[in-house]
Image (spheres, rainbow, N blue to C red):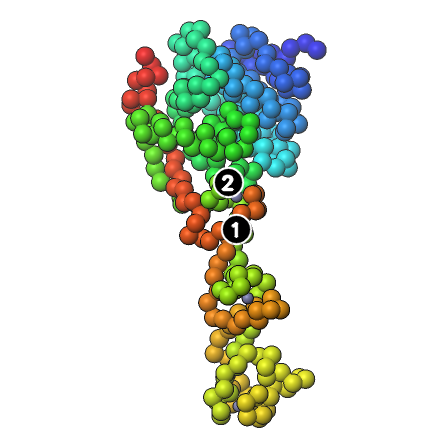
Amino acid sequence: MPEKILTLENGMRAQLLEDFIDRNEIPDIERSDIWIINNDNACKVKDFLITAIRHPDPKVFLKPVFLQKELKKVYKESNNCNLKNLSDGYIQKINIQNKIPYIRFILNFIKKLDNTSIHEEDVLKRTLLYYYSRNKDIEHYESSGSLSGYCYPRIEAHYTNITDAYVKGRDLLHHAFEHDLLRREYVDTSHICKKCNSGFLNYREECPKCKEHNLQVRVLIHHFRCAYVGTEPRFQKGDKLICPKCSMELKNIGVDYDKPGKVFYCLNEICKNEFQKPLVGVHCINCKTEQAPSELNLEKIYNYKLTLKAINEILN
Ligand SMILES: [Zn+2]
Ligand SMILES: [Zn+2]
Ligand SMILES: [Zn+2]
């Protein structure tokens, strides 16, 4: 297949990457200024972008790479691929007119880096270089495909394992913050499993006596005449409501009886506890650990900005 390299109006050379993505192969970087992805296989595109992100050569991992807006719908159907956050975003056809200053800044910056290759494991340096070259903040992204539900896609792309992506990605951000390379801005508070950090949690009411969570909500009935209060099933006789204490029939709500509230009833045969205040238990869908809400790990989510110290370090 011939390489598809287009020279755009402004002299910018753009390479269409369809075949390279099929082969997950990095093309010769000197042949073009930018890459345009025109492959409709979201998973393959993701693999390619990750390969580029992890590449040691800054000319590769900082290369401007755009997705085609025409394929946005196709990509959206592939859950959790999150291609936008792993690239420079979408362009319409090959129109980069409004991105020229953005691209020029990146290309000039790459030139200044000479031929330094940056080790795959120096994720912090790679991250700082990338965000500086894009003049962007490190922003969180909400995704059900990530471990805790909140992720930093560009950083986490350096790790294959989902737990590593979370733990090492967060360590990196924390370390950079502690060393004054990043400042942060609070976004949200998240509760995650104490054992595995998953945010995929099921909260449910529990019986305080036996800890069973198979509960029933029962309506309370208050009979005015004799002041008896009990749950609805105790009054039900066929389709009538009969007071179990005084045996009178209840006819008009608000006149001879009312419903002052609800109680929980434990459906565990050997418990059958009735109670007003249930406990809340949390089940982790990811690792199956049961825990109380107070045991969950609490994590604050931030967006980050490069500090002057980080910028000075990058430029020297
Ligand atoms: Zn119980
Ligand atoms: Zn009664
Ligand atoms: Zn867990």
The residue shown at (54%, 89%) is 245
User: Which residue is located at x 49 percent, y 42 percent?
Assistant: 195
Quadrant containing the N terminus in the rendered view: top right
Report if the beta carbon of the residue with label 1 is closer than 8 angstroms to ligand 3: no
Rendered position, 28 above or below 291:
above
The image shows residue 237 at horizontal and vertical percentages of 65, 85
Q: Where residue 254 sits in the image (x, y, percent)? A: 50, 86
Labels 1 and 2: the sequence-earlier one: 2
Q: Position of residue 20 (x, y in %)?
A: 64, 16
In the figure, is residue 312 to the left or right of 290? left
- Determine the secondary structure under disc 2: loop
What percent of the width, then of the height, locates residue 223? 51, 87
Residue 140 is at least partly visible in this image: yes
Which residue is identified by label 1?
A: 290
Seen at 60% across and 66% down, the residue is 268
Give the total number of marks visible in the rendering. 2
Q: Secondary structure at mark 1?
A: strand
Q: Residue at x 32, y 12 (%)?
A: 316
* Mark 2 Cα shell of 10 Å, populated few (<14), some (14-19), many (≥20): some
- Viewer-nearest residue: 255 or 109: 255
Closer to the camera, 134 or 159? 159
Q: Residue furthest right?
A: 1
**Badge 2 residue CB within 8 Å of ligand 3:** yes
User: Which numbered disc covers residue 196?
Assistant: 2
Displayed quadrant of residue 249: bottom right
Residue 213 position (above or below residue 309): below
Going by the numbered disc 1, the residue's amino acid type is Glu
Q: Amino acid at mark 2?
A: Cys
Give the Cα distance between marks 1 and 2. Answer: 12 Å
Numbered badge on residue 144: none
